[in-house]
Image: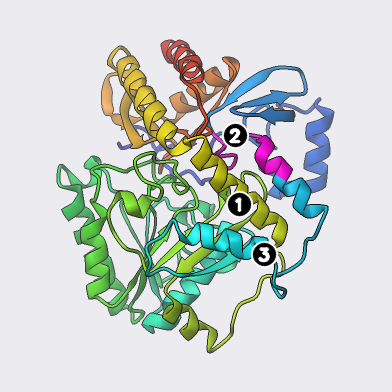
């Protein structure tokens, strides 16, 4: 969708969507808000024009200081549910016993690494643990450059891959001013609006053109780096397998495919544990983070041993807190809970239920456009009622505020911030899905 006015046509940064504006008059009498702004200053990022003070969370719900409860359909970090007792117990037990770095042999670390590697194709048998997805993507990019001998990267137009200096360069949605550097080329998101009915062919040809541009500029192609559900671009997963053609072209040109699974990974898509698995492609490197520790900060990447060995010939890699025993205890508990509670199956089942409900509501409301996604990772376009091909970011903000009033947390995505982004905990029940649909229906009526 394209935006109808010059104001709405501007690209919205990932941190500007659904965010508090410290320059506004709203919240000036809130002591907790003023305390945060005084402490963090211009780097402060808070949701909503009137930020919420949270005090606790359990399962799919969060509770505010004023006693109001919110169904959390936004925060994909607590994938097995906020404050899950099994994760809490594992972290508490391990931190009371030992927490140190990976320079020592600690059984829980290798227990976790082996459990994690079991979720990957056999070729990807070396894992490096970090503290954030940004670090994981930074390392993946460096490995790609070393092994291909090239420095150019291809990402999508509204991509977000992290916040280190190197990774920010491949995160167009982070830029408030200026533009991406010369060694990075963007391609449009894999949507019907951009490529018509043959998304696979259109996206592959865009990638092929980007490779040519990088060669002309003298960089060559180091890697195609994409979030497998294209979250920041507006959530694009269909048709299943469309990524294969683009990845083949990258490999033929001597580049790597880095699958950024920080958001879609760990069973969220329901029908597959990973986004690359959903598209039936084999990455050269996979990065992950966010839901990995269910709130305990951990991330990592996996790759082929020969790729990692070649990189380590020059500089090696060590991360003081990456892969510490407490994080591995948390990660191992997450994998066990997902299996014991069949959360990937639940994501598939409840995701289909939500999609059906959202499409039913969309049929009765002209401002609700296309519903996209897989499992419990969904995007809903908000559009001009009389011109469905035109995005309406302002209405998206109103919808998010209406959901908040109904006790539901949601976010925005897309180049213009006109897509409602939904990522509830994988433990979401049908009753909780109904609560969301009721709130969404009521908020949609007021658009």
Is 100 situated left or right of 207 in this image?
Answer: right
Measured as percent of width and height from the top left, residue 154 is found at: 36, 64
Q: Residue at x 66, y 60 (%)?
A: 108
Tag shown at residue 444: none
Q: Is residue 114 above or below residue 270?
A: below
Mark 3: secondary structure: helix
Per the model, the C-alpha gap separating discs 2 and 1 is 14 Å
Residue 377 location, x and y as percent? 42, 37
Report if the CB atoms under discs 3 and 2 are less than 8 Å apart: no
Q: Is residue 367 visible?
A: no
Q: Nearer the viewer, residue 281 or 421?
A: 281
Q: Check disc 3: other Cα within 10 Å, few if <14, some if 14-19, many if 20+.
A: few
The residue located at (59%, 82%) in the rendering is: 316
Q: Give the prevailing secondary structure in the magenta stretch.
A: loop
The answer to which image quadrant residue 249 occupies is: bottom left
Specify the quadrant of the image occupied by residue 9: top left
Q: Earlier in the sequence, mark 2 or mark 1?
A: 2
The residue that label 3 is drawn on is: 107
Q: Give the CA separation, mark 3 to mark 2.
A: 26 Å
Say which quadrant the N terminus sits in: top left
Q: Locate the C terminus and report the quarter of the image it occupies.
A: top left
Residue depth check, mark 3 versus mark 2: number of the one nearer the observer: 3
Q: Which mark is residue 331?
A: 1
Q: Secondary structure at mark 1?
A: helix
Give me the disc on residue 81.
2
Find numbered disc 2 in the image and state the secondary structure of the residue it sits on.
Answer: loop
Identify the magenta region.
Answer: 74-89
Between residue 317 and residue 86, name the one nearer to us.
86
Place of residue 269 in the rendered image (x, y in percent of width and height, measured from the top left): 39, 41
Residue located 43% across and 43% down the image: 10
């Amino acid at each position: 969708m394209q935006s109808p006015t010059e104001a709405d046509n501007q690209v919205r940064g990932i941190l500007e969507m659904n965010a508090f504006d410290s320059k506004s008059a709203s919240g000036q009498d809130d002591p907790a808000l003023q305390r945060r702004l005084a402490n963090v200053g211009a780097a402060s990022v808070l949701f909503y024009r009137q930020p919420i003070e949270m005090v606790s969370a359990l399962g799919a719900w969060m509770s505010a200081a004023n006693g109001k409860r919110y169904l959390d359909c936004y925060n994909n970090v607590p994938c097995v549910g906020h404050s899950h007792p099994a994760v809490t117990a594992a972290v508490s037990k391990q931190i009371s016993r030992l927490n140190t770095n990976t320079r020592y042999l600690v059984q829980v670390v290798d227990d976790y690494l082996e459990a994690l590697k079991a979720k990957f194709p056999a070729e990807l048998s070396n894992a490096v643990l970090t503290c954030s997805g940004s670090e994981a993507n930074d390392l993946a990019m460096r490995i790609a450059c070393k092994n291909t001998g090239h420095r150019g990267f291809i990402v999508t137009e509204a991509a977000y891959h992290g916040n280190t200096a190197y990774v920010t360069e491949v995160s167009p949605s982070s830029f408030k001013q200026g533009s991406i550097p010369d060694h990075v080329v963007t391609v449009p998101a894999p949507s019907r609006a951009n490529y018509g009915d043959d998304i696979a062919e259109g996206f592959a040809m865009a990638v092929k053109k980007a490779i040519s541009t990088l060669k002309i500029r003298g960089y060559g192609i180091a890697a195609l780096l994409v979030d497998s559900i294209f979250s920041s671009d507006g959530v694009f997963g269909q048709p299943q397998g469309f990524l294969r053609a683009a990845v083949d072209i990258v490999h033929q040109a001597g580049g790597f495919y880095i699958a950024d699974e920080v958001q879609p990974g760990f069973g969220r898509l329901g029908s597959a544990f990973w986004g690359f698995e959903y598209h039936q492609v084999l990455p050269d490197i996979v990065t992950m983070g966010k839901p990995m520790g269910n709130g305990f900060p951990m991330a990592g990447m996996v790759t082929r041993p020969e790729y990692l060995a070649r990189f380590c010939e020059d500089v090696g890699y060590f991360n003081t807190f990456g892969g510490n025993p407490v994080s591995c205890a948390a990660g191992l508990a997450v994998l066990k809970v997902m299996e014991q509670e069949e959360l990937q199956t639940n994501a598939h089942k409840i995701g289909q239920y939500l999609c059906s409900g959202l499409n039913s509501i969309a049929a009765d409301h002209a401002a609700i456009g296309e519903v996209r996604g897989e499992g419990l990772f969904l995007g809903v376009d908000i559009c001009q009622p009389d011109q469905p091909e035109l995005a309406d970011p302002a209405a998206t903000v109103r919808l998010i505020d209406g959901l908040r009033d109904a006790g539901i947390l949601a976010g925005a995505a897309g180049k213009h911030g006109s897509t409602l982004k939904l990522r509830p905990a994988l433990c979401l029940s049908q009753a909780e899905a109904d609560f969301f649909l009721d709130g969404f229906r009521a908020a949609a009526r007021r658009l």
